């Protein structure tokens, strides 16, 4: 996942000497801090100072050609990805804006200088100083200064998406110490992630926005600092980026061998089946397939047989996160965790995997699936120590029962699962009357709406609906266009959705956005399920404050276990590879990092 981060700054004696190479003093004046070329969450970064390129790129990749891509959505109406209003065009953040630091894809969480030549932070990480490169430029030729960094931070937390206010919540002060030197001071000295998440902040030009209203730029192409600029667009239908030939950072180690296409064009499709056929006809060059049925049946024909189109699964080792049917617990119908637990017994994953997905998927049973962060078995050792102070606030099952999603494997199958669901619903105060599941206290039937924007997902939902009907539960299905879907989800105007919650190999401040009680009613927050639990809040804080990788793993596993026993989702499935198809004019590096492939490291054959 792309991680945007928190920050604070400090005043200085060095003035214009931004790119320091000697030690500076910490706020206390007692600790010497040496500028570093890179920073790791825990331990030391992999790549040395002055490294020429990342191991997983081809530094000699040729530049040129046009990469044509598709977007499955009902258009866009904004070039501002940082504002909650509107739908931003694809690719804006990646291609238009550089960040202070750049993450590597083959480490858990390390970053290296991009706009910032060096970074200074003490052992307790109570502050961070970024020293900016003198050559760093916006696309209009103006230098990137510390004032631009301060402007960006203040704009994002006051006018940007609510996400930024949560992400940067621990920043206490921001001080410009010189034209190319800026300092962030932190409220907490136990949040080791803050310098890194500030490093991933995309930097905006203060001079460009000086006479413009941040949330009302519409479809006026903005000035960026990144490797591409907007060259052409058809509002809501397509957008084309052109490579900046004199891009200021093109020879840096964090950029060498990357961003090789002269042009990148996105075309929008409102129907994914139409998009698939357009790909096979050569209208665009690359497709990441999300449908198991398509992968098994649709990628055939002469162009595949003769090698014109390449089909392959590219293995990755990144956390798979959680995809599932997500309950909106703000709704009265889903306020009881016993009801949520009961409904999970009506989803027959084994049937779906065999009959719909051609056996391609593995059942998900963790929010941090496919990583060492996932909980398993019963809590023991250090993980038990972390959970023990919360025992009275947690369900006893957290300590006594391993979480496993309901399965229909075995002789009893779905019939036995529906019996279990009925037993749980009765314990929650429901009973069947005239074929309907009725709340005995309120007299209300157990009924809800599933909101979708992908019509192709109906084939997954309809068997689930049928199984629920056998319990007297009425699930209606509503499919809306992608723009309406986004707006309804932002305003929590849904009962149930299919939601993916991505996770990185180094969870941190973004967990507040997912789980914090304070975000339950914040429009646009990613606390989709309405999690409102003081234990979860405390565990998130502990994750952010983890002093070592080992301790981080234990604390994440504890959070994972508590979330699973909260029954906020009905887990679905995951893959440990990416299903891709592309026209053979494209080439990719021989090495794939643990985070998986990155199209921005590919190139077009000369």
Image (cartoon, grey):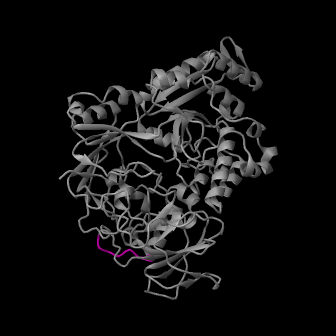
The residue at 61%/37% (across/down) is 328
Residue 331 rendering spot, x and y as whole percentages: 64, 35
Q: Quadrant of residue 528?
A: top right
**Outermost right residue:** 392
Residue 297 vs residue 102: left or right?
left
Residue bounds of the magenta highlight:
140-146
Q: Is residue 391 magenta?
A: no
Taken as a whole, is the magenta stretch helix, strand or loop? loop
Can I make out residue 567 in this image? yes
- Label tally: 0
Q: Nearer the viewer, residue 593 or 459?
A: 593
The residue at 67%/30% (across/down) is 341
The residue at 64%/56% (across/down) is 550
The residue at 30%/70% (across/down) is 248
Can I make out residue 79 in this image? no
Residue 591 rendering spot, x and y as whole percentages: 36, 52
Residue 316 rendering spot, x and y as whole percentages: 44, 45
Q: Quadrant of residue 98?
A: bottom left
Residue 416 vs residue 178: left or right?
right
Q: Nearer the viewer, residue 420 or 178?
A: 420
Residue 598 vs residue 13: left or right?
left
Tell me if residue 408 comes above or below residue 139 in the rendering: above
Tell me if residue 253 comes above or below residue 509 in the rendering: below
Q: Is residue 142 magenta?
A: yes
């Amino acid at each position: 996942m792309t991680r945007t981060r928190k920050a604070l700054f400090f005043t200085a004696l060095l003035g214009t000497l931004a790119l320091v190479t000697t030690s500076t003093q910490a706020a206390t004046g007692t600790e010497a801090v040496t500028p570093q070329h890179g920073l790791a969450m825990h331990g030391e970064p992999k790549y040395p100072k002055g490294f020429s390129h990342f191991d997983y790129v081809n530094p000699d990749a040729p530049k040129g050609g046009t990469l044509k891509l598709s977007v499955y959505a009902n258009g866009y109406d904004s070039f501002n990805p940082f504002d909650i209003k509107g739908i931003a065009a694809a690719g804006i953040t990646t291609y238009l804006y550089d960040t202070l630091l750049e993450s590597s894809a083959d480490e858990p969480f390390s970053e290296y200088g991009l706009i910032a030549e060096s970074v200074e932070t003490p052992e307790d990480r109570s502050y961070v100083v970024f020293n900016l490169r003198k050559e760093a430029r916006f696309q209009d030729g103006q230098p990137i200064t510390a004032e631009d960094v301060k402007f960006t931070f203040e704009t994002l937390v006051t006018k940007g998406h609510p996400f930024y206010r949560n992400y940067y919540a621990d920043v206490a002060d921001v001080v410009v110490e010189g034209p190319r030197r800026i300092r962030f001071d932190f409220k907490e000295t136990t949040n080791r992630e803050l310098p890194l998440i500030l490093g991933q902040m995309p930097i905006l030009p203060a001079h460009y926005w000086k006479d413009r209203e941040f949330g009302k730029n519409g479809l006026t192409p903005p000035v960026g600092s990144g490797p591409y600029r907007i060259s052409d667009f058809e509002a809501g239908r397509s957008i084309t980026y052109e490579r900046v030939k004199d891009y200021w950072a093109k020879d840096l180690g964090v950029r060498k061998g990357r961003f090789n296409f002269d042009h990148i064009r996105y075309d929008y499709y409102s129907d994914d089946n139409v998009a698939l056929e357009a790909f096979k006809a050569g209208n665009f060059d690359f497709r990441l397939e999300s449908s198991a049925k398509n992968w098994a049946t649709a990628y055939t024909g002469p162009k595949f047989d003769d090698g014109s189109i390449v089909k392959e699964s590219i293995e990755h080792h990144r956390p798979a996160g959680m995809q599932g049917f997500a309950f909106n617990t703000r709704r009265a119908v889903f306020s009881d965790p016993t009801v949520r637990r009961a409904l999970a017994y009506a989803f027959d994953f084994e049937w779906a995997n065999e009959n719909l997905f051609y056996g391609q998927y593995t059942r998900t049973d963790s929010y941090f699936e496919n990583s060492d962060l996932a909980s398993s078995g019963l809590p023991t050792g250090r993980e038990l120590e972390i959970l023990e102070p919360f025992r009275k606030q947690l369900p006893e099952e957290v300590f006594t029962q391993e979480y496993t999603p309901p399965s229909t494997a075995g002789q009893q199958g779905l019939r036995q699962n529906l019996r279990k669901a009925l037993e749980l619903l009765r314990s929650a105060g429901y009973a069947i009357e005239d074929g309907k599941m009725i709340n005995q206290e309120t007299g209300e039937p157990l009924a809800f709406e599933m909101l979708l924007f992908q019509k192709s997902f109906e084939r997954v939902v309809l068997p689930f609906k049928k199984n629920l009907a056998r319990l007297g539960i009425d699930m209606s299905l509503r499919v809306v266009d992608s723009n309406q879907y986004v707006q309804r989800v932002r305003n929590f105007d849904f009962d149930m959705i299919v939601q993916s919650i991505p996770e990185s190999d180094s969870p941190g401040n973004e967990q507040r956005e997912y789980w914090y009680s304070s975000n339950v009613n914040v429009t646009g927050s990613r606390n989709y399920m309405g999690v409102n639990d003081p234990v979860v809040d405390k565990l998130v804080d502990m994750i952010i404050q983890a002093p070592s990788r080992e301790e981080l793993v234990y604390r994440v596993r504890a959070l994972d276990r508590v979330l699973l026993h909260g029954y906020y989702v009905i887990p679905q499935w995951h893959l440990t590879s990416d299903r891709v198809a592309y026209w053979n004019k494209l080439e990719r590096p021989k090495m794939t990092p643990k985070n998986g492939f990155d199209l921005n490291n590919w190139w077009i054959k000369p």
